[in-house]
Image (cartoon, rainbow, N blue to C red):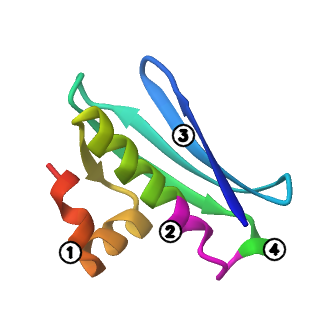
Amino acid sequence: MIEVQHNNGEKHGNFEAFIDGKHAGTMAYTWAGDERFIIDHTEVEEAYSGMGVGKEMLLAAVEFARKEDKKIIPLCPFAKASFQKDASLQDVLV
């Protein structure tokens, strides 16, 4: 099971994924004002590639954006492609 932890700072934040307590990946973002954040980079550890780690972090980011009424700017190629593939996530896009 993939566990995602959210770390939010004043200017930057990230979603970190863990599998069985081991770090599996990170999705980093930067705040662009008070109402939106930019997903800059997504990285999944090689050992966990293809296991849906990136998708789980993206879903956590979307859930956070919806809950806090924020918008997402996906600069990271992985995030951008994921939003393009799944119309059900696009409500949080700028």
What's the magenta region? Answer: 49-56
At 16% across and 57% down in the image, what residue appears? 91
In three-dimensional space, the C-alpha distance between marks 1 and 4, rounded to whole angstroms, equals: 29 Å
Point out the tag, 3 or 2, that comes first from the N-terminus: 3
Of 13 and 88, nearer the camera is 88
Q: Nearer the viewer, mark 1 or mark 3?
A: 1
For label 1, the SS is helix
Q: Which residue is mark 2?
A: 55
> Label 1 is placed on what type of residue?
Ala
**Residue mark closest to the camera, 3 vs 2:** 2
Q: Residue at x 59, y 75 (%)?
A: 52
Please tell me which of labels 3 and 4 falls first in the chain: 3
- Residue for badge 3: 14
The quarter of the rendered structure image containing the N terminus is: bottom right
Q: Helix or strand or loop: what does disc 3 sit on?
A: strand
Q: CA distance from mark 3 to mark 2?
A: 14 Å
